[in-house]
Image: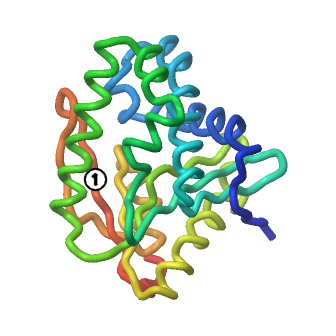
Amino acid sequence: MVKVRPATRGDVEACARLLALSFHDDPGTMVFEPDDARRARILPAFFRTFVAASLAEDADLVVAGDPVAGIASWFGPDRHGPSPEAMDANGFGEALEQMGPEASRRLLAMVGEIEVQHERLTDDPHLRLEFFGVEPGRQGSGIGSALIEHGHRRADELGLPCYLETFTKPNVRYYERRGYRVIGEYVVGEGVPVYGLARPPGAPPG
């Protein structure tokens, strides 16, 4: 049985490395930095900021594995991501500086559009799966399912839907098997598709 536990400050570096690895080939990170080598250099700092800021604001940030092999960050219903103040206090400015002006501009434009669309597609209280990653060599071991089910249990207890965004069709199918349905599609960057998916409370696997 996969054990899921709350992340701690001691997990920040491991979580940042894992998310950087998980999202290295994701179309979303390619939007703001298309160069493979540069992307590998800048992603750990970005995710380090995100994880630390999430912990500072008491997000439902959970991990599995020892060492950490999976992470999921659940937000809501009151807040659906770390605040700008928490991001700034945990090194976001330095992460943007490391990215450089062009990548930073593309990142901020993409995040801005994602947040606009998030507001458009969700008008009720909900939980949001902000980031989710499993070490490539451990995929298929049940770690991902355990992390997802953790959020689903909380959502069902609260009677709330779940919402997330993803950039790939295989991920859409992954979430559809877990009770999600596409509720919106839009583009960021130079025509890169983003899919917004929602899961009603108590939804059975698809």
Q: In which quarter of the image is residue 28?
A: top left
Query: Which residue is drawn at the image coordinates 54% and 60% (left, top)?
Result: 59
Question: Going by the image, does 181 lie left or right of 183?
Answer: right
Residue 13 drawn at (x, y percent): 69, 35
Residue 158 drawn at (x, y percent): 46, 86
Query: Which residue is drawn at the image coordinates 33% and 69% (left, top)?
Result: 198
Query: Which residue is drawn at the image coordinates 18% and 27% (left, top)?
Result: 190
Query: Which residue is drawn at the image coordinates 78% and 53% (left, top)?
Result: 65
Residue where numbered disc 1 is placed: 195
The quadrant of the rendering that contains the C terminus is bottom left
Give amino acid for label 1. Answer: Tyr
Q: Is residue 147 above or below residue 92?
A: below
Q: Which of 91 and 74 is in front in this view?
A: 91
Q: In which quarter of the image is residue 167?
A: top left
The quadrant of the rendering that contains the N terminus is bottom right
Q: Is mark 1 on a helix, strand or loop?
A: strand
Q: Is residue 140 above or below residue 198?
A: above
Question: Going by the image, does 82 lie left or right of 31?
Answer: right
Q: Which of 84 and 183 is in front in this view?
A: 84
